[in-house]
Image: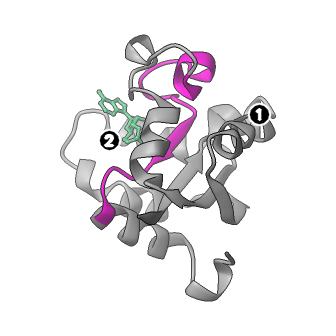
Amino acid sequence: AVERTLSIIKPDATERNITGKINQRFEDAGLRIVAQRRTRLTREQAEAFYAVHKERSFFDSLVGFMTSGPIVVQVLEGENAIEKNREIMGATNPKEAAEGTIRADFAYDIEKNSVHGSDSPETAAAEVKFFFADVDIVK
Ligand code: CMP
């Protein structure tokens, strides 16, 4: 089925000016960028977006990283988009990411891992809504 997923190009990637290279990966895989905005998260926004990880040891560091520079938030649309994007990104830890994935090719480490993608239909719906109004998503 055609799905939408929330993608974030993280501060380690915007800092290196590789947002276009990453977007090319999505488009080459048949995903369409149907909404996109460059922004910088406040601490409150980052804490809210990653609230499910609140109790994890890496939470404070993650929030610090995600607020350290600009990000690009985007909605990707396509057949099986949620799973397809997870394949294109590769494993969270770049050391475990398959060859040719975004994280294998660009990520620094398990935190500075260049991209985020929704992990299920439920989180995709919530995460898309976190950043975008329906009128700002244009097929
Ligand atoms: P992301 O897919 O955005 O989801 C949570 C983020 O926390 C993850 O990518 C990493 O940037 C960061 N993170 C840091 N340490 C860990 C860890 N040990 N396990 C999972 N995520 C981590």
Q: What secondary structure is found at the residue carrying circle 1?
A: helix
Q: Distance of mark 2 from mark 1, alpha carbons?
A: 28 Å
Front tag of 2 and 1: 1
Which mark is first along the chain, 1 or 2? 1
Q: Residue at x 21, y 39 (%)?
A: 56
Left/right placement of residue 137 relative to residue 123 reads: right
Quadrant of picture, ligand 1: top left
Q: Position of residue 37 (x, y in %)?
A: 71, 64
Hey, what amino acid is under mark 1? Answer: Lys
Residue 40 in view in this figure: no
Instruction: Locate residue 41: give its quadrant.
Output: bottom right
Q: Position of residue 97 (x, y in %)?
A: 43, 18
> Which residue is farthest left?
55
Left/right placement of residue 73 relative to residue 85 reads: right
Q: Is mark 1 within 8 Å of ligand 1?
A: no
Q: What secondary structure is found at the residue carrying circle 2?
A: helix
Which residue lies under the disc numbered 2?
59
Hey, what amino acid is under mark 2? Answer: Phe
Residue 119 in view in this figure: yes
Mark on residue 21? 1
> Relative to residue 111, is residue 94 depicted above or below?
above
Give the residues in magenta.
101-121
Q: Position of residue 98 (x, y in %)?
A: 45, 16
Q: Residues within 10 Å of mark 2 (few under 14, many from 20)?
A: some
